[in-house]
């Protein structure tokens, strides 16, 4: 390289580094002043302090930190700054519409997108800054949120649920016959709700198709369900070989499979196949629970209420044994040291979405407020991190710590003393921040 070319190269590098420095310096700064921090793990709040957010990350924490002259200062007034809430079992599309709306002959993908977009924005304004979507049409919604065209939480998408024929994700209407025998995909498959896949080859294709579109984890149906008509709760779904195929395909992409399963038999097969997460599990027995601990498998649980006004009568009947056994399962999981996560799993009852925060309070039967807040922030974030490089967002969540992603809530009062504060986000969430951007600020509104 000649001297002239070297001079040009170094001049160019100097300009590039200078522009990078200017860009870094220009990152917006927000300071939460006089806040008491729940860091996602501790059982106590900090003393009043300052938290500096620069760009989309927490840059510094301490009473004496300084910010630039253009920084926005938010007076915390001694209230609680905590991580954003995380729900690891949502269906943003399926929870935004009723069964009748989902089955309406004139339903279009655009109509489903509009309904789920409204639900996603409302969820963010309830303080849920991150969710794991475990099945359904999701790609357009997530893309719209990521592009800033729509408002909503961070989404860890599964894409279409993967189900065997006559499995929990076989959502065909009575007149729809098997694609394999008659050549026509079902309406639910065309809408991106499910893949009906039988045999190792079809399971591999379905899993890889979801991964191609950006799935952060794979959702597989391993047993009967309560919101489907044709599969009894007690049945075990997918052979070991089929389930193992899904696990191998996911592991090749650096991520994991979670399964819908309630019964010990279905869960044992999933563990043997290498599944990393069990979603539901309310019919678990102690012996199978021990296997979860031994194999380092997560249990993603929900607290189901016995009834709701719009529930289908058949669904109400199928839920009865699960409702009856769930207190015992929560107690066993707590006492045996299972890796626990929490989610809501609302389906086809849009009115229930407004109770998302209130469902957190149902955990008080088994945990202290500090344990509950850790569960719905730090612990749920650890489950999200299982996606590894397939995670759509690289960075630490579920904590208030230096260099963590700035997903934060400023909560009126002290939720460690009064957990019910988080059940009223309209009145008690003073600031809602996701990725360093403020979506609600009562100080600016007043």
Image: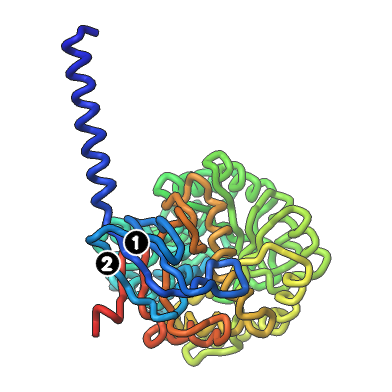
Residue 32 shows in the view = yes
Where residue 203 sits: x, y (%)?
55, 48
Q: Residue at x 52, y 89 (%)?
A: 308
Residue picked out by circle 1: 436
Where residue 268 sits: x, y (%)?
75, 58
**What is the quadrant of the N terminus in the image?**
top left
Secondary structure found at label 2: strand
Q: Residue at x 44, y 49 (%)?
A: 394
Say the numbered circle drawn on residue 72.
2
Q: Residue at x 38, y 77 (%)?
A: 76
Where residue 5 sits: x, y (%)?
19, 13
> Which of disc 1 and disc 2 is earlier in sequence?
2
Q: Is residue 381 left or right of residue 333?
A: left
The relative height of residue 296 versus residue 369 in the rendered view (above or below) is above
Residue at the far top: name it: 2
Q: Is residue 346 left or right of residue 316?
A: left
Closer to viewer: mark 2 or mark 1: 2
State the separation of the CA atoms marked 2 and 1: 12 Å
Where residue 201 sits: x, y (%)?
56, 42
Q: Is residue 271 left or right of residue 118?
A: right
Q: Are marks 2 and 1 in contact (CB under 8 Å)?
A: no
Residue in the foreground of this view, choosing between 46 and 301: 46
Q: Residue at x 70, y 75 (%)?
A: 330
């Amino acid at each position: 390289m000649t001297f002239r070319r070297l001079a040009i190269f170094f001049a160019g590098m100097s300009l590039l580094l200078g522009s990078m420095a200017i860009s870094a310096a220009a990152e917006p700064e927000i300071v939460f002043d006089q806040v008491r921090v729940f860091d996602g793990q501790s059982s106590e709040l900090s003393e009043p302090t300052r938290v500096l957010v620069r760009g989309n990350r927490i840059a510094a924490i301490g009473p004496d930190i300084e910010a630039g002259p253009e920084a926005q200062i938010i007076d915390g007034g001694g209230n609680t700054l905590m991580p954003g809430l995380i729900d690891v079992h949502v269906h943003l599309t399926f929870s935004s519409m009723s069964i009748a709306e989902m089955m309406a002959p004139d339903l279009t993908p655009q109509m489903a997108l509009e309904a789920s977009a409204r639900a996603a924005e409302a969820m963010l304004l309830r303080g849920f800054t991150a969710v794991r979507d475990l099945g359904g049409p999701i790609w357009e919604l997530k893309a719209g949120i990521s592009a800033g065209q729509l408002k909503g939480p961070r989404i860890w998408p599964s894409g279409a649920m993967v189900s065997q024929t006559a499995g929990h994700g076989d959502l065909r209407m009575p007149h729809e016959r098997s694609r394999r025998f008659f050549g026509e995909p079902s309406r639910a498959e065309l809408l991106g709700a499910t893949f009906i896949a039988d045999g190792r080859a079809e399971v591999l294709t379905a899993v890889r198709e979801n991964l191609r579109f950006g799935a952060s984890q794979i959702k597989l149906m391993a047993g009967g369900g309560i919101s489907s008509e044709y599969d009894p709760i007690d049945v075990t779904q997918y052979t070991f070989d089929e389930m193992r195929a899904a696990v191998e395909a996911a592991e090749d992409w650096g991520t994991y499979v979670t399964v819908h399963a309630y019964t010990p038999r279905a869960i044992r097969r999933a563990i043997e196949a290498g599944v990393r997460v069990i979603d539901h599990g309310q019919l678990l027995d102690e012996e199978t629970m021990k296997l979860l601990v031994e194999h380092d498998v997560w249990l993603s649980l929900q607290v189901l209420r016995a009834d709701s006004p719009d529930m289908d009568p058949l669904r109400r009947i199928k839920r009865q044994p699960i409702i009856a056994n769930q207190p015992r399962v929560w107690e066993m999981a707590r006492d045996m040291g299972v890796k626990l996560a929490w989610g809501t799993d609302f389906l086809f009852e849009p009115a229930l979405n407004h109770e998302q925060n209130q469902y957190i309070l149902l955990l008080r039967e088994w945990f202290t407020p500090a344990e509950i807040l850790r569960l719905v922030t730090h612990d749920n974030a650890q489950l999200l991190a299982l996606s590894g490089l397939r995670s759509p967002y690289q960075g630490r969540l579920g904590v208030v710590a230096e260099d963590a992603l700035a997903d934060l809530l400023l909560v009126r009062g002290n939720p460690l003393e009064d957990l019910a504060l988080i059940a009223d986000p309209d009145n008690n969430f003073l600031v809602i921040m996701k990725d360093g951007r403020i979506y609600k600020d009562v100080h600016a509104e007043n």
